[in-house]
Image (spheres, rainbow, N blue to C red):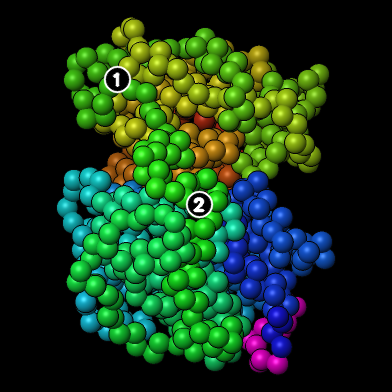
Amino acid sequence: MAAGNKVTAIPEGSWVLVTAANGYTGGHIVIELLKRGYKVRGSVRNKASAQWLLDDEIVSSHVKRGEFELVVADTSVPNAFDDAVKGVSAVIHVAIISAFDPDPNVAIPATVEAALTVCRSAAREPSVKRFVFTSSFWAATFPAPGVTQTITNLDTWNEAALQAAWAPPPYDASRAIPVYCASKVEAEKAVWKFVEDEKPSWVVNSVSPCVIIGDIRSDQHLRSVPPQLLEQLYLGNTAALSTTAMYYSHVTDVAVIHVAAALDPDVKNQRIQVLAGSYNWDDCLDILRKAYPNRQFAANFLPDKPAMAYTIENNIAPSLIKKWAERDWISLEASVTETVDFIVKHKNLRSNNQAAKSTSKNNNREHPMIRFINTTHPDDTTSAHSLSLIRSHVARHSRAARQERKLQSHQVIMFPPSATPETTLISSEEEYHSGDDQATASQRLPWKRAGGLRLLAPKQASWSRSTSTDSQRQWEFNPIQLIGGARKDSSQGFARALSDDEQYLFDYYLNYVILNGYSSCYHKESDKEFQDSMRDLWVPYAMTQPSLMAAIFHVACRNYAATTNNDRTHRFAIQKLQYRLTCLSMAKDAIASQEVADDTTISLALILASESFFEGDISAYLTHCSGIIKMVTARGGLNMLGLSGFLTKSIAWSVYTPTNQLVLGPEEAELINYN
């Protein structure tokens, strides 16, 4: 089905960028665009996770004809979409960071920044005529049955979520949902404000579904909440279904509305609520009994028949479905049945009355949980015993790490011994090609120095990638590596209690990043010197400073996201951006409050500089390096810095060296000591 005789805002055959094209909604948007004669460029964080889309029975033929292509771009990386938007006529921005972090100071800025990343790139591309942003009905309100509120186009926002999210701390787990909803509010507001302030050449519309179900085309999409809730209903676990009523939309209808928002010339500056109809769990049970007559289901448990009753001002979604799909909404019955049919088939759920007896067993098998092996609870990290364990954790050196890297479960991709320093710049979505084992240091990195740390410099060679698995190794912990398995005291305690994720990241930083993540910053023959300095000088100091702890977690998240492809990868990619924003905020506050920058502030700036470089943001790298030069000059020179010369040497070779073609620092006489 092509666009046919309909008048469209962009010509048939134009290229359209769809972010998160491998997602549940994004994949269906791709399909609907291809059906209508448009070419699609889909952005993904990881090409491997999009293989299902390339193999899809509808999409695959378009791939062969060059009408669909994938690009790798991450909303957490500045300017990552500059190339992706080249030559496209429309952008449908589905991808957005929405982490369940209870701290609004972390989650909300990260979500907003992810929303604006693509906006900025699209605003710089003159070919873009239309921009569609995926939001949520939760950005307008907390959906509740029986409420008769009117949802206006651009004036109704979930103020209750904002108030709950920004209430005073503590930020415990109960804050996660309000913060999530508030991040949706602020992200969509930010997009509308961007359009108002920047006045880009394109027309913007937002699309706000509520619960999306139906036509699951990949098992990856079973991770979303609605299919999981329907699975629990199928299994009889009604206690897990706390929300009694909600609005549904079939995923195909949601995709059609996105396409209409991009193509329909009459739809401009609209906030489109995609609400096919109200439903409750009793409605779903009735559908399941009809679809599976031989199975016994739980009894209906909602005698009051709760239903949604909101009024949508200027509700154009139904007319857009009629115009662009030439039908009405897909029914609740079809939506529920398609979803549950896929779940039953994929998970081999039993269809007879014995299913209930094995529910617990099936759930344990089908829903593996990430386990963190720790004998020290994060809330107990200030006790004397816990501090003792933590101190000994820092004292561990590379022996245990080398033993662990011998594991061969292939869950995490490691850089091979022959990989050159330049390969550390390759993103997680790409594979790397190991370099020549016989290459000299000068061949591997153009700006080298004998002894000491090496200048951070951009790669100058183009490296091909292969799919060889010879260099894939597992990076995991056993109990003796973790905090609870410590045996000696050394160093000092953490500046604050750590979450389970942060304990994991700290282990990863010690046992992987220090060994592998800085290989482009020093000579191979200086491995032991660098690693010992990092463990004995840098880490014990950084542990005592909240800002440097955030920096360590940022570095760990980036390295993990760049070298792995597992259940944690996406979560840590999101947290990377959150920690970066935290570091930037702390650096700004420190600079404003200190007449002369201390070692912590200078160290933080150095980490921000190196991380900007590794992520390809040279402009930010130059800015940070310029700031470092000013701070060191105010301190009286490099020799006035602490950490037993480690900070001096790090900055000397990363920023001040006269051969640095990126930042020309002052040629101070003290540099002679490091030449």
Q: Residue furthest front?
A: 294
Q: Quadrant of residue 54?
A: bottom right
- Where is residue 381 drawn, in percent x and y? 24, 24
Judging by the rendered image, the residue that carries numbered circle 2 is 344
Q: Quadrant of the N terminus?
A: bottom right
Which of the two labelled residues, at mark 1 and mark 2, occupies the earlier sequence position? 2
Identified at 59% across, 58% down, the residue is 217
Amino acid type shown at disc 2: Val
Q: Nearer the viewer, residue 566 or 585?
A: 566
| Range shown magenta | 5-14
Q: Quadrant of residue 501?
A: top left
Judging by the rendered image, the residue that carries numbered circle 1 is 375
Placement of 612 over or under 485, stated as above or below: below
- Where is residue 109 drawn, in percent x and y? 37, 56
Amino acid type shown at disc 1: Thr
Does residue 407 appear left or right of residue 295 in this picture? right
Identified at 41% across, 13% down, the residue is 480
- Where is residue 574 drawn, in percent x and y? 46, 47
Identified at 58% across, 45% down, the residue is 615
